[in-house]
Image (cartoon, grey):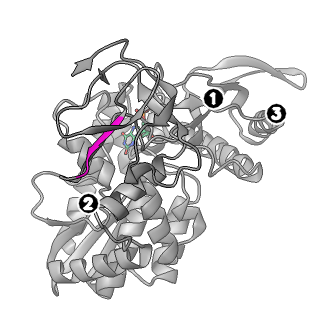
């Protein structure tokens, strides 16, 4: 039997009302949980016993020990539930009898074996973006099949500062991967000339990337497989029929639909934190493993208005200062993303005796768990001061720095 109420979520107190293996280790009979104040079970069905309650929910947890069925009506997976992780562990280990064998070493061993079994002696291609997912996927596949792997890095001219060099250093020199580095910025800037609409930009960048990748792929003899850094959340998301398509998140490096490749997806069962742990274990540098997310279309969607080489240069220089100072302040890992945005408008300023007429730079920094929602980050004033003075002094073409204090919703993390 159930009743429905306000449908809001919030923190409440859960009180154990009858012994349950899920709550076996609680020192007191109570804990904080995150719960809907809306739908509530008012009475346990036949065969079940209520094992916990909250002020709003008489049956906040229940079980039928004979049939070994357990249910909870709160959210054990969210951080606001104090002993949530423990409840999940008790369920998995004690009730289901699962073994905690999902370790990073085992993940690597299992993936290596699966990749070898899947590809045999065929050639495999991997598009590196500079981001953590494609880097870990490539390193894992390289561990499995060595020089059967060819990696392709397309420099779109819209990457962060130093990204191309780092890919070269890590993959060509450290891992000795067969790497094709395509310097294609001219081609990207020419297709972006005159384009200001965000979706058109994404499309132009995505299509150009695919065309370049196809050309390269044709030259790699016998390439039958393509590595994709698909993660478990992508698998879940693409499986939800009604997931709202708010922006076409065209991931540059994504698979063109008509390409005749079989996919190798070694990260398909992993969450981001697991991908990072695997990356560390494989010996990837910290800079890559802990890199903040970066959109596939790169700086292209952080230049608001037409994308030109000059604007990309200005934004890349400002962005490098943001990242350097955020790192120095010890906030890089804590922030979900921190970056610079360049709206293509000019504002008036003064410098020395003269008047300037130059671009503003917007600083965007957010905290988030999954990018679905985000909070604007309260950066310390002294950091903001350093950012403002360094960007204006060191980056030609910028005379003003502003801070974006919009959370998501209603804003999005990126400006386009
Ligand atoms: P928004 O701006 O929608 O971004 O709040 C959510 C997350 O997705 C990233 N993002 C993209 N990633 N291709 C990508 O691969 C894209 O076109 C794209 N647009 C946004 C964004 O950086 C944030 O982490």
Could you say which is closer to the camera, residue 161 or residue 327?
A: 327
Q: Position of residue 361 (x, y in %)?
A: 64, 30
| Residue 169 circle label | none
Q: Which residue is mark 3?
A: 385
Q: Which residue is mark 1?
A: 362
Q: What secondary structure is found at the residue carrying circle 3?
A: helix
Q: Position of residue 270 (x, y in %)?
A: 35, 60
- How far apart in space, not on screen, are marks 1 and 2 (Cα)? 33 Å
Instruction: Indicate yes or no: mark 1 CB to ligand 1 under 8 Å.
Output: no
Residue 361 is left or right of residue 226, and the answer is right
Quarter of the rendering containing residue 347: top right
Could you say which is closer to the camera, residue 148 or residue 34?
A: 34
Q: Bounds of the magenta span?
A: 61-65
Categorize mark 1 by other alpha carbons within 10 Å: few (<14), some (14-19), many (20+). many
Q: Is residue 28 above or below residue 171?
A: above
Residue 352 is left or right of residue 108, and the answer is right
Quarter of the image with the C terminus in it: top left
**Furthest-right residue in this view:** 353
Q: Looking at the image, is mark 1 or mark 3 earlier in the sequence? A: 1
- How far apart in space, not on screen, are marks 1 and 3 (Cα)? 13 Å
Q: Position of residue 348 (x, y in %)?
A: 72, 16
Q: Which residue is mark 2?
A: 213
Q: Main secondary structure of the magenta part?
A: strand
Of the two numbered discs 1 and 2 in the rendering, the one whose residue sits closer to the viewer: 1
62 falls in the magenta region: yes
Categorize mark 2 by other alpha carbons within 10 Å: few (<14), some (14-19), many (20+). some
Q: What secondary structure is found at the residue carrying circle 1?
A: strand
Quarter of the image with the N terminus in it: top left
Could you say which is closer to the camera, residue 108 or residue 326?
A: 108
Residue 64 is left or right of residue 315, and the answer is left
């Amino acid at each position: 039997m159930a009743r429905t109420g306000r449908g809001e979520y919030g923190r409440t107190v859960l009180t154990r009302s009858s012994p349950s293996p899920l709550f076996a280790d609680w020192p007191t009979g109570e804990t904080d949980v995150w719960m809907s104040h809306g739908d509530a079970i008012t009475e346990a069905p036949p065969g079940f016993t209520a094992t916990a309650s909250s002020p709003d929910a008489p049956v906040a947890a229940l079980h039928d020990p004979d049939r070994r069925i357990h249910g909870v009506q709160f959210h054990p997976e969210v951080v606001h539930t104090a002993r949530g992780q423990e409840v999940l562990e008790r369920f998995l280990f004690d009730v289901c009898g699962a073994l905690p064998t999902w370790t990073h070493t085992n993940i690597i061993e299992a993936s290596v074996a699966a990749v070898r079994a899947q590809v045999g002696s065929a050639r495999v291609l991997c598009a590196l973006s500079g981001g953590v997912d494609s880097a870990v996927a490539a390193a894992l596949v390289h561990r499995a099949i060595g020089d059967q792997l060819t990696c392709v890095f397309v420099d779109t001219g819209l990457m962060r500062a130093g990204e191309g060099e780092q890919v070269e250093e890590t993959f060509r020199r450290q891992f000795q991967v067969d790497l094709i580095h395509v310097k294609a910025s001219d081609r990207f800037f020419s297709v972006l000339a005159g384009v200001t609409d965000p979706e058109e930009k994404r499309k132009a960048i995505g299509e150009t990337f695919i065309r370049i990748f196809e050309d390269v792929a044709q030259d790699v003899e016998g390439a039958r497989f393509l590595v994709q850094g698909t993660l478990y959340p992508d698998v879940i998301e693409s499986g939800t029929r009604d997931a709202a398509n708010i922006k076409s998140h065209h991931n540059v490096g994504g698979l063109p639909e008509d390409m005749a490749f079989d996919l190798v997806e070694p990260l398909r069962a992993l969450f981001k934190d697991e991908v990072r742990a695997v990356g560390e274990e494989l010996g990837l540098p910290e800079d890559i493993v802990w890199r903040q997310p970066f959109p596939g279309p790169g700086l292209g969607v952080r230049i608001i208005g037409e994308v030109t080489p000059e604007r990309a240069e200005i934004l890349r220089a400002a962005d490098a200062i943001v990242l350097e100072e955020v790192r120095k302040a010890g906030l890089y890992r804590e922030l979900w993303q921190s970056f610079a945005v360049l709206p293509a408008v000019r504002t008036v300023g003064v410098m020395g005796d003269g008047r300037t007429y130059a671009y503003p730079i917007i600083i965007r920094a957010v905290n988030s768990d999954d990018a679905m929602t985000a909070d604007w980050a309260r950066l310390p004033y002294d950091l903001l001061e350093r950012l403002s003075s360094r960007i204006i002094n060191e980056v030609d073409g910028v005379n003003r720095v502003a801070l974006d204090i919009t959370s998501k919703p209603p804003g999005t993390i990126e400006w386009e």
